[in-house]
Image (cartoon, grey):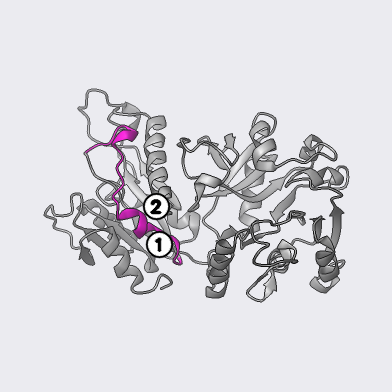
C-alpha cells in the first residue's frame, strides 16, 4: 500500500472567500468538519500513514488544528510556500525525501476513492503517474484528458481551453499517484500548475495513465459547489459511491433513447441528442445511481466508420449533454455483427460475441468493473434486444416509445413509458435520492 500522501492546501480560495471570510479553504466545514479533516480521516482509514501538507495563505489555521497529526493517528509535516506556487510548485521541496510512489490530493475536494483499486491499476500499468479521471457536469472549465485504448494518456487540455474543443467528457479529477522520480521535473521555487503547465508536457516524458472511476470526488471551491458537496455528504452519497460498496446503475441504450436514431449513425454531425435527454440524465447524475450507456455499434463491423470516428460521435454526444449539465459515467459499445454480406465489412468484427445485445455481456462487464448490484439496477431501451439483455442480466427493464419503441415485440418489459424522462421519473420517483 502506498502510505504517503501530499495534500495541496496553499491556495487562497478566492472564489469562496466571500462566503467564508478569513477561513483557509481546507478549513471550510462540510458536514460540521473541515474539508481536510474529511480527507485525513477517509484515507488514513485506508492505510495512508504519512501526510505532507502544502500551506501558504492562512496556513497557520491548518497547522494549529492538525498539529503533527497525532490526534488522527498519522504523521503530518508541512511544506510552507513563501509565495504562491500553484498546485505543483511546492512539491520540489520533497525531492529526495519521498522514495516510493505517493498520493496527491487537493485540499478543497471531498472524495471517497478506493485506494487499493487505483493502486492496483497503477502497478498493473507500470505507470509513473496515474490520474483519476471522470466525467462531470462542467467540462468546459475543467482539465480534459485524451487516452488510448490501453488508458495511456496522450493529451491533456488544461483549463481554460477553446470552447470549440470537442473530445470526450473525461476530466482530470485532481487525485493522483506519482512516482518519486517525477519530482525531479518540478522546478524549484517556480509557480506551476499540474493541469495547465505540467501534464500537457509530461505525456511525452512519463508513462501517464487515466484511471476512470465512478466514485465521488468534487471540489468545493465555489459556494454553489460547496452546497452540492454538503448535500452529497449528508445524504451518504460520498461514501456510498466508493467501489468497495455495491453500486446501483441505470443502463441506457443510445440511439432512439438518448439521441435521434437516424439508422446506423456514422458521422458526428448525425448525433442529435434529444432535448429531454440532458435533464433526465442530469437527474440520474444527482441521484445515487450511476449512468452507463450500453449500445450496439455494428457500424464498425459493417465498415461504415472506424473507431476514431465512433469516438468522435460519442464526443459530440458528451458535448451536447455537457451543455445541458449532464454526463454519462461510462459507455460500453459492441462493435461486432455476426451476419456477412455487407460490401465494406471488416471480417475481424464479423463474429458471434458475448457483448452484442440481446446478450447481456456489456451489462455483466460493467457489473464486474463497478461492483454493481444488478438486482437494484435498471435497463432503459427502445428495442426488444435491449429488454432481452436487461432481463438476462437480472435488472428491471423499461421500454420507451421513442426510437423503435413502438415496434411489436414478443418480450415484455417490466414497464413501458413515453421517453427517457418518464423512465427516470419512474425509477427515481419524486426524489432524486431514491
The answer to if 282 sits in the magenta stretch is yes
281 horizontally vs 123: left or right: left
In this picture, is 40 found above or below 403?
below
Q: Nearer the viewer, residue 204 or 302?
A: 204
List x then y, in percent, for residue 296.
Answer: 30, 43
The local secondary structure at tag 2 comes to loop
Q: Which residues are magenta?
A: 263-288
Q: Nearer the viewer, residue 327 or 222?
A: 222
| Viewport quadrant of the N terminus | bottom right
- Asked if marks 2 and 1 touch (Cβ < 8 Å), the reply is no
The local crowd at label 1, few if under 14, some if 14 to 19, many if 20 or more residues have their Cα within 10 Å, is: many
What residue occupies the far top of the structure in this picture? 343
Q: Is residue 396 visible?
A: no
316 horizontally vs 408: left or right: right
List x then y, in percent, for residue 266.
Answer: 29, 32
Work out whether mark 2 precedes mark 1 in sequence or the reverse, and give the earlier one: 1
Which residue lies under the disc numbered 2? 324
97 horizontally vs 315: left or right: right
List x then y, in percent, for residue 94.
Answer: 85, 46
Q: Residue at x 64, y 67 (%)?
A: 19
429 horizontally vs 7: left or right: left
Q: Nearer the viewer, residue 284 or 20?
A: 20
Q: Residue at x 82, y 60 (%)?
A: 59
The answer to if 331 sits in the magenta stretch is no
Residue 305 badge: none
Q: Residue at x 57, y 66 (%)?
A: 229
Which residue lies under the disc numbered 1? 284
The local secondary structure at tag 1 comes to helix
Quarter of the figure with residue 158:
top right
Amino acid at each position: 500500500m502506498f502510505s504517503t500522501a501530499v495534500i495541496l492546501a496553499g491556495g487562497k480560495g478566492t472564489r469562496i472567500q466571500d462566503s467564508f471570510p478569513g477561513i483557509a479553504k481546507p478549513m471550510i466545514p462540510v458536514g460540521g468538519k473541515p474539508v481536510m479533516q474529511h480527507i485525513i480521516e477517509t484515507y488514513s482509514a485506508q492505510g495512508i500513514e504519512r501526510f505532507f501538507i502544502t500551506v501558504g495563505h492562512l496556513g497557520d489555521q491548518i497547522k494549529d488544528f492538525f498539529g503533527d497529526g497525532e490526534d488522527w493517528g498519522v504523521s503530518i509535516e508541512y511544506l510552507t510556500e513563501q509565495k504562491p506556487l500553484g498546485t505543483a510548485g511546492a512539491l520540489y521541496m520533497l525531492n529526495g525525501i519521498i522514495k516510493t510512489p505517493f498520493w496527491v490530493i487537493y485540499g478543497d475536494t471531498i472524495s471517497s476513492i478506493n485506494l487499493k483499486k487505483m493502486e492496483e491499476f497503477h502497478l498493473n500499468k507500470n505507470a509513473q503517474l496515474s490520474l483519476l479521471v471522470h466525467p462531470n457536469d462542467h467540462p468546459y472549465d475543467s482539465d480534459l484528458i485524451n487516452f488510448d485504448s490501453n488508458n495511456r494518456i496522450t493529451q491533456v487540455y488544461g483549463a481554460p481551453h477553446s470552447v470549440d474543443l470537442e473530445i470526450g467528457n473525461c476530466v482530470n479529477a485532481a487525485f493522483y499517484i506519482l512516482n518519486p522520480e517525477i519530482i525531479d521535473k518540478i522546478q524549484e521555487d517556480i509557480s506551476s500548475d499540474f493541469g495547465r503547465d505540467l501534464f500537457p508536457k509530461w505525456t511525452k516524458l512519463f508513462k501517464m495513465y487515466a484511471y476512470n472511476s465512478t466514485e465521488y470526488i468534487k471540489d468545493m471551491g465555489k459556494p454553489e459547489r460547496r452546497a452540492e458537496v454538503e448535500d452529497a455528504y449528508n445524504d451518504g452519497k460520498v461514501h456510498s459511491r466508493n467501489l468497495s460498496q455495491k453500486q446501483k446503475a441505470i443502463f441506457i441504450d443510445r440511439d432512439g433513447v438518448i439521441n435521434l436514431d437516424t439508422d446506423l449513425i456514422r458521422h458526428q454531425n448525425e448525433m442529435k441528442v434529444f432535448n429531454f435527454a440532458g435533464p433526465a440524465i442530469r437527474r440520474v447524475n444527482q441521484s445515487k445511481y450511476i449512468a452507463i450507456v450500453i449500445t450496439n455499434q455494428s457500424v464498425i463491423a459493417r465498415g461504415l466508420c472506424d473507431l476514431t470516428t465512433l469516438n468522435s460521435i460519442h464526443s459530440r454526444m458528451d458535448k451536447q449533454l455537457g451543455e445541458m449539465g449532464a454526463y454519462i459515467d461510462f459507455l460500453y459499445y459492441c462493435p461486432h455483427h455476426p451476419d456477412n454480406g455487407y460490401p465494406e465489412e471488416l471480417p475481424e468484427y464479423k463474429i458471434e460475441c458475448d457483448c452484442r445485445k440481446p446478450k447481456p455481456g456489456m451489462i455483466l462487464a460493467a457489473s464486474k468493473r463497478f461492483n454493481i448490484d444488478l438486482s437494484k439496477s435498471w435497463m432503459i431501451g427502445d428495442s426488444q434486444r435491449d429488454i432481452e439483455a436487461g432481463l438476462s442480466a437480472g435488472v428491471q427493464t423499461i421500454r420507451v416509445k421513442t426510437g423503435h419503441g413502438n415496434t411489436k415485440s414478443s418480450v415484455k418489459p417490466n414497464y413501458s413509458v413515453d421517453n427517457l424522462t418518464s423512465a427516470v421519473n419512474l425509477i427515481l420517483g419524486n426524489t432524486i435520492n431514491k
